[in-house]
Image (cartoon, rainbow, N blue to C red):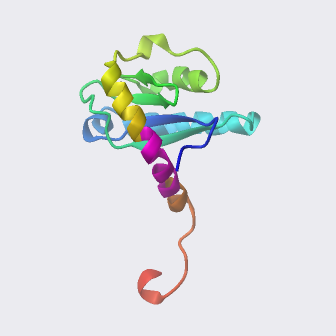
Amino acid sequence: MNPAPGRRYVLVCRGPNCKAQGSTEVRERLAALIDAAKRESPEADVVVLPYTCFDRCGRGPNVVVYPEGVWYEAVSEADVQDVARHVLGGAPAEHLRADVPARHAAEYAELFAELIPEIEAEVDKRKRPPKKGWWPFSR
């Protein structure tokens, strides 16, 4: 299964180092900005997703725009507007760009292509109300 064609993804690290540096707040703020933009422009097909770790600890919070392959590092809540502007059609936020070795970026691009559908499915499942059913599983 491949990611949806034409869709852009913003993957925000949720590893322990990035989390300690504020990645959860960055992801939540970014998702809120993207959701607001999609209400005004429904054609904007951008999804914000958490990702386990980009193996760039100490440079976080790390954010990757896929499939474009733009890597950002040290993204703060104050920078989120710049990242959102980029993924909604603007120019990349050059002041946040990470210098990532091509091999590292290529390896992660392969992982993203494989894992994004699974991550999206898991996020969708969490948004749905729990099913009522057989009592041991409906608690």
Q: Is residue 33 above or below residue 71?
A: below
Q: Is residue 82 above or below residue 63?
A: above
Q: Is residue 139 visible?
A: no
What residue do we see at 75% from left, 34% from top?
Answer: 40
Which of the pair 89/139 is nearer the observer?
Answer: 89
Q: Position of residue 81 (x, y in %)?
A: 55, 23
Q: Position of residue 36 (x, y in %)?
A: 66, 37
What residue do we see at 32% from left, 34% from top?
Answer: 54
Q: Quadrant of residue 76?
A: top left
Q: Is residue 103 above or below residue 107?
A: above
What residue do we see at 41% from left, 86% from top?
Answer: 136
Helix, strand or loop for the magenta stretch, by majority: helix
Whether the magenta-drawn stretch holds residue 10 is answered as no
What residue do we see at 42% from left, 23% from top?
Answer: 71
Q: Which residues are magenta?
A: 112-122
Residue 4 lies left or right of residue 24; in this view the side is right
Residue 24 lies left or right of residue 31; in this view the side is left
Residue 26 lies left or right of residue 34; in this view the side is left
